[in-house]
Amino acid sequence: METVSLTNALSAAVDEAAFDLELAAIASDGRSRQPTRERVSTAQFQELYLREKDRLVELYARAVLPDAAMARLVDALRRTLGQFIHPDTDRIGHAFPVDRSVHGVTTFRQDGLVDNESQSSLKEFAYAIVRAAAIMGVKRTVELLADWSRGKPINLCMCTVLSGLPLAAPLTPRQDIRIVPLAMSTAELPRLPTRRDAAPRDYLGLSMLTVQLSASPALVRLDPDAKEGSVHSSSVDGVNLDLVCEALSLLANDHVSTGFIWHEYPDAAPFCLTTKETWGTVGDNKLRRRDKVSASHDMLTGAVTITPSGDAPPPLQLDEKEVLQIVEALCHADKKLRIAVSRWRRSKRSWVRLEESYIDLRIALEALYLKDFDDERSQEMRFRLPLFGAWHLAKNLEERRSIRKILRAAYDMASKVVHGGEVLKEEGAGPYWKARAELDQAQDNCRRGILKLLREGPPRDWSDLVLGGSGS
């Protein structure tokens, strides 16, 4: 890509530009306050953006240019990026959002990643480039466009607010994974998406998980009749948010899940200042507030601050090296072990009926300890599962007896549920709490087995293990 003409046209445009600015604070309930509107110079806009970009505000700015300056910029774009501009629609495709770009394709993939591509009219793309150059400079903006035109992927982050993981300190187990505890006051929250079902006060005391990805091609000529997207995102080692949540669940011994998900674009953020698109709102992915807290409301500023109650569990202290070890082990785990992890995590959901938790736990245990015995009859499975679990986890006879009893009881309870038998009484009755306690014990042993397999690998021969050998 020849950059001189684009650099000259963009520099002239930035010099002549002004910006119509809208800025609105976000209240603790997620509503936007009355916005301020003003026209500012390029220097004023840059200063305001740098000051406000990480605060909980709605920020929008549209470049205002003389017609001649816009015409020169559009002409320079057409000459330098013509291969990505469709000749019939005069639109350019890109793997990042641009303000006022209403045409796009979002593809939800089975591997947990989401592909996003957008297209803009060339004139709207030019407005976005002027704003980007006002924020990060003409040289950097042109360098990015040149890199993308040569096929370099765009950097992006897949982000989520987590349910079930109050952290004591930030974690960066490796460069592409970051977990940060969120503030206890809305006055200190970073700039996060606002939603109807999740206001800023709902984020307090939770944690935000970010996984770095890349997407390519960053610039693309899009066929308006294409049924499938052209842009594809990728991660390191196939890591996605759900895999990291599984690792965190195992280490926290709790159900950790995504609340909702959105994309951030570190390099291309200045191209789009408006509200981020989010997804993931149902089932396990519904954001749950931190519990056992009291809230206070500052009538002057509108800020909400939460304070944990005396019986609230303390924030979790997790070790980065241990998180990394489990994440990387899950990346290379076989299908059966991943099923065991997934179903164990589902069994830890505190808001579902106890019967559902027993069924999920049985599936987890079968995937963990019956992977080589898929064709066995029910009675044989009932015998083998607690036996293998006991020998895998215990070092002596008494401990093996205890684990075998716990796993068999859980397996039998799940069998009764599956076959429609009357199993559990209402919550609060003695049988319910007995079943709850037995479930907890079985879950703990299942978790121990999963972690042992992730850290040490499976025995070479399960039968040798039961006969008293090491199995390795």
Image (cartoon, rainbow, N blue to C red):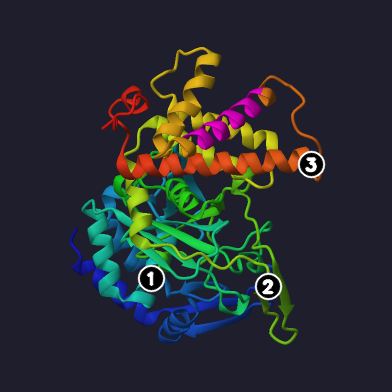
The residue that mark 2 highlights is 310
Residue at image point 45% right, 33% down: 390
Q: Is residue 203 above or below residue 261?
A: below
The residue singled out by tag 3 in the image is 430
Observer-nearest of 112 and 428: 428
Residue 51 shows in this picture: yes
User: Hey, what amino acid is under mark 3?
Assistant: Gly
| Residue under the image location 80 percent in, 35 percent down | 425
Q: Earlier in the sequence, mark 2 or mark 3?
A: 2
The image position of residue 78, as x and y in percent, is 30, 57
Magenta residues: mostly which secondary structure?
A: helix
Choose between 87 and 1: the one closer to the eye: 1
**Mark 1 vs mark 3: which is more N-terminal?**
1
- Name the amino acid, label 1: Ala
> Type of residue at label 2?
Gly
Q: Secondary structure at mark 1?
A: helix
Q: Nearer the viewer, residue 181 or 16?
A: 181
What residue sits right under mark 1 in the picture? 132
